[in-house]
Image (tube, rainbow, N blue to C red):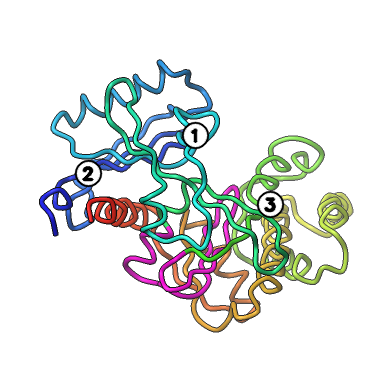
């Protein structure tokens, strides 16, 4: 290992709404971390430069900086073209863009684009590739992994490389439907695992009716007294996740062959774990932060190597 690869590095997960940065030791552990609501969607170029300047002020003796997420999109500092799947550490490291943000050198990590094997349709990710490469570098090189979130990714890994994937907008649909519009009027409290959630999962997985119909049916159930308001969020979340699990089972017929790592927010990941368990699929929860740290570290070592 070279002296460059043994240095502390800075990994920045820079999305549309938030920035989260880590100072990472050579063993992949975090030395310090910083978060701010300074996502690229709300910043001009001067604002992005100021955000990096804040990191430099916090860590004046910083090592190489790597930034992933929307900072490399068409609304970020510079657009980093997607690496094409199948892609692993080498392909992603080679496709990274060297940039200078406010005079500070930053290596911008590209996203990954694929044509899905099961239907030959295009899909894209930007930011999640770091967590997936961290997972592949430390725990899981072959099989299907999922990243529950606003836009959940279902990803096939082959020999440590991202082979293909599909994206489900279930999280964003849930957020929008339960914050405004007709369904917001029946929602009370947060979603949790239980009979109402499992009923929603079963209905979503069955595909007897489309989501447009079953989602409105949640309102009818509450109005007619067949579903408690306190259970409505759980039922709606279950409908969406259940339909997503049905898609995953169709797209990945071998989904149940081995435990599926779930990378992301723990409460949401536990709902996915429960929904998958009802379909006979075992899961393993993986911390998003840990996967991110290992991914940035692995990218640095690939870049130096």
Nearest to N terminus: mark 2 or mark 1: 2
| Secondary structure under the numbered disc 3 in the rendered image | helix
| Residue in the image at 42% along x and 73% along y | 159
Q: Which of the pair 150/176 is nearer the observer?
A: 150
Q: Give how far apart the Cα atoms at labels 2 and 1 are.
A: 22 Å
| Residue in the image at 65% along x and 45% along y | 172
Q: Which image quadrant: the N terminus?
A: bottom left
Residue 233 numbered tag: 3
| In this rendering, the label closer to the viewer, 3 or 1 | 1
301 on left or right of 250? left
Q: Which of the pair 118/249 is nearer the observer?
A: 118
Residue 79 numbered tag: 1
Residue 9 numbered tag: 2
229 on left or right of 85? right
* Count of number-bearing discs: 3
| Secondary structure under the numbered disc 1 in the rendered image | loop
Nearest to N terminus: mark 2 or mark 3: 2
Q: Give how far apart the Cα atoms at labels 3 and 1 are.
A: 38 Å
Q: Which residues are magenta?
A: 132-161
Instruction: Relative to 268, say whether 47 is above or below.
Output: above
| In this rendering, the label closer to the viewer, 2 or 1 | 1
Instruction: Relative to 188, say whether 101 is above or below.
Output: above
Q: Where residue 275 sits: x, y (%)?
A: 62, 69
The single residue placed furthest to the left in the displayed view is 3
Q: Give how far apart the Cα atoms at labels 2 and 3 are.
A: 41 Å
Q: Where residue 87 sits: x, y (%)?
A: 46, 60
Q: Where residue 70 sits: x, y (%)?
A: 49, 37
Q: Which image quadrant: the C terminus?
A: bottom left
């Amino acid at each position: 290992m070279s002296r460059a690869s043994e240095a502390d590095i800075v990994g920045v997960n820079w999305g549309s709404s938030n920035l989260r940065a880590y100072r990472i030791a050579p063993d992949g552990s975090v030395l310090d971390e910083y978060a701010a609501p300074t996502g690229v969607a709300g910043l001009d170029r001067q604002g992005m430069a100021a955000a990096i300047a804040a990191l430099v002020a916090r860590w004046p003796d910083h090592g190489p900086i790597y930034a992933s997420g929307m900072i490399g999109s068409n609304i970020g500092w510079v657009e980093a073209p997607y690496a094409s799947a199948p892609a692993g550490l080498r392909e992603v490291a080679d496709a990274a863009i060297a940039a200078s943000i406010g005079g500070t050198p930053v290596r911008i990590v590209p996203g990954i684009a694929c044509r899905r094997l099961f239907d030959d349709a295009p899909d894209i990710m930007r930011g999640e590739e770091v967590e997936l490469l961290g997972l592949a570098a430390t725990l899981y090189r072959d099989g299907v992994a999922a990243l529950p979130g606003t836009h959940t990714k279902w990803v096939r890994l082959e020999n440590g490389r991202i082979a293909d994937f599909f994206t489900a907008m279930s999280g964003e649909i849930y957020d929008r439907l339960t914050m405004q519009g007709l369904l917001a009027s029946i929602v009370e409290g947060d979603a949790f695992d239980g009979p109402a959630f499992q009923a929603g999962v079963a209905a979503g997985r069955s595909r007897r009716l489309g989501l447009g119909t079953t989602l409105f049916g949640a309102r009818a159930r509450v109005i007619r007294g067949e579903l408690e308001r306190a259970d409505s969020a759980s039922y709606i979340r279950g409908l969406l996740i259940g339909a997503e699990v049905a898609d995953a089972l169709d797209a990945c017929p071998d989904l149940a062959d081995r435990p599926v790592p779930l990378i992301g927010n723990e409460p949401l990941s536990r709902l996915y774990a429960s929904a998958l368990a009802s379909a006979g699929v075992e899961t393993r929860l993986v911390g998003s932060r840990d996967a991110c740290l290992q991914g940035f570290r692995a990218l640095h070592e690939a870049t130096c190597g």
